[in-house]
Image: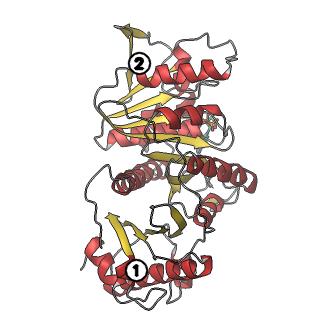
Amino acid sequence: MPALNRDFLKAALSTAEGPTGEPLVRNLEWTAACETFASVKLHFPGITDADTLDAAARRTHGAIRAAAGEQGVVLSSLIVEIVDEAGTVLLSSNSGPKPSDDQNAKLNDAGEANQAKAPATTEHKPAAQQGASGIPGVKNIIAVGAGKGGVGKSTVSVNLAVALAKKGHAVGIMDGDIYGPSLPTMLGLNAHELILRERMIEPFLVHGVKAVTIGKMVDPEKPLIWRGPMAHGAFKQLSEQTSWGELDYLIIDLPPGTGDIPLTMAQSLQLSGAVIVCTPQKVAQDDAVRAARMFQQLGVDVLGVVENMSYFIGDDGKTYDIFGRGGAEQMAQRLGLPFLGAIPINTALRTNSDSGDASANFDPNTAGGEALPKALAKLADNLESQTALAGMKQGRTKPKLTIS
Ligand code: ADP
C-alpha cells in the first residue's frame, strides 16, 4: 500500500489540471507529509483572481483525496496553500481534519464538501517574528492562547506538556499568563521553593516537565496590576533567564485575549506556532477567531485548534452534548486551520488540576476512565505532527522540497 509522502502527493497532482490546463504538479512549490497529515503549497504565476485560485485549491484537494481513496492511503488532514512569488499566502484551505464517516460520505468526487475557504488576500507577512530569536537548546516553542478566559487554556497547556513528556520528549512549560498564573496550582508547585543560580531561574521539575511561573515570585493573594512595560519585562525575564537546558518543546501558556503579551512574545521569541483553545459555543468561537487572526497578523503559524469541554460522559455511560460538540472543529475548518482534537468535560480533570496532579489525568483509574487519557494522547500526537509540518514549512527542519 503506498504511503502518504511527497511522491504520493506529486503523483496525485500529476493527473489533475491547473487553471491553464497544465498538470497541477507543475505549480507545486513545496509539499510535506507527516503521519496522516499533509500540506502542499502551489504557485500559479500571474493568476490573482480569487475564484480561479479557489477552484484550483478545490481541484488540489479533490485530486489528493481521490488518490488517497483509490489507493487506501490514510489522509486525515490536508492543508492547501496558494502563494504568490514572494511566498505570501493568498489562500489557505483545509480539508479534514479527520472527517467522520458521515462527512466522508458527503465528499464528492471533487473532494469539495469538506473544503474550507479562506478569502484571498495579498497582505504581506508582518515583521513581528522577523527580529525574534529562539532560546538556545530549545527546538520548538509553542504558545497556547484562547480568545477568552475560562475555556481551559491553562488546563490544555499543562496536559499537552505532560502528554508530550510521556511520549519521551524533553518538555518545558512557562506560565506566560502574567496576570493570572495557574501553574502553581495546576502543577502542585505551592510547596516548592524558587531557586536562582547565577541570576538564572531554575525551573521546577514536576510531572516529567520543567516548569516556570511568575506565580512563584509574587504574593499569590495580591492582584498583579502591571503596566505594559512591566508585564513585557516579566515575560522576557521568564523566557530568557530560565535555565531551560535542552528541550524538544517549550509550551507557553498565554494570557487570554489579544493583549500585549502575545505581541511581546511574537517579537522576542521565534515560535514554531500557536495552539488555540476554544469551547464549542458560538460566543467562544467568535473570540477564538480573533485570537487566530491575531497570531496570523503577528506572523505566527496556527498549529491547530483544541475543542475543550466538548461533551460530557455521564455515570450512565451516555455522552451528553452540553455546549454543542463539534463547534470549534467546524470553526477550525472554516478558517482552514488543523483541528488537534477534543477534550471532554471531566470531573477528574478539574479535581486533578485543583490538587496539582496532572499525571493523574493519564491513568484511567484516576482520570474517570479511558476517555480523558486517550483524548490527551491524541492531542499530543496531532500537535507533534503539526509542529513537524510547520518546521518543514518554515524551513527550520528537513526535508524540504522545491519543484521547479
Ligand atoms: P483558562 O486558562 O482558559 O482560564 P483553565 O484551564 O484555568 O482556563 O480552566 C478553568 C477551570 O475549568 C479550571 O478549574 C479547570 O480545572 C476547569 N476545566 C478546564 N477544562 C475542563 C474540562 N475539560 N473538564 C472539566 N473541567 C475543566
Please say if 41 is above or below 262: below
Gap in angstroms between the C-alphas marked 2 and 1: 46 Å
Residue furthest to the front in view is 46
How was this image coloured?
Answer: secondary structure
Label placed on residue 64 = 1
Q: Is residue 308 visible?
A: no
Q: Is residue 58 visible?
A: yes
Please say if 244 is above or below 300: above
Frontmost of labels 2 and 1 is 2
**In terms of depth relative to the viewer, which is nearer, 374 or 97?**
97
Which label's residue is closer to the chain start, 2 or 1? 1
Q: Residue at x 70, y 17 (%)?
A: 225
Residue furthest to the right in view is 283
Query: Mark 2 falls on what kind of element?
Result: loop
Please say if 402 is above or below 225: below
Percent across and percent down for residue 340 are 49, 56
Q: Is residue 187 left or right of residue 244?
A: right
**In terms of depth relative to the viewer, which is nearer, 107 or 141?**
141
Query: Mark 1 falls on what kind of element?
Result: helix
Question: Mark 2 = which residue?
Answer: 241
Percent across and percent down for residue 183 are 52, 26
Q: Is residue 42 left or right of residue 304?
A: left
**To which quarter of the image does residue 334 belong?**
bottom right
Q: Name the quarter where the C terminus is drawn.
A: bottom left
At label 1, counting other C-alpha atoms closer than 10 Å, the crowd grade (few under 14, some 14-19, many 20 or more) is: many
**Given the image, on which type of amino acid does mark 1 rest?**
Ile
Quadrant position of ligand 1: top right
**Given the image, on which type of amino acid does mark 2 rest?**
Gln
Percent across and percent down for residue 256 are 65, 37
Q: Is residue 244 left or right of residue 211?
A: left
**In terms of depth relative to the viewer, which is nearer, 204 or 7?**
7
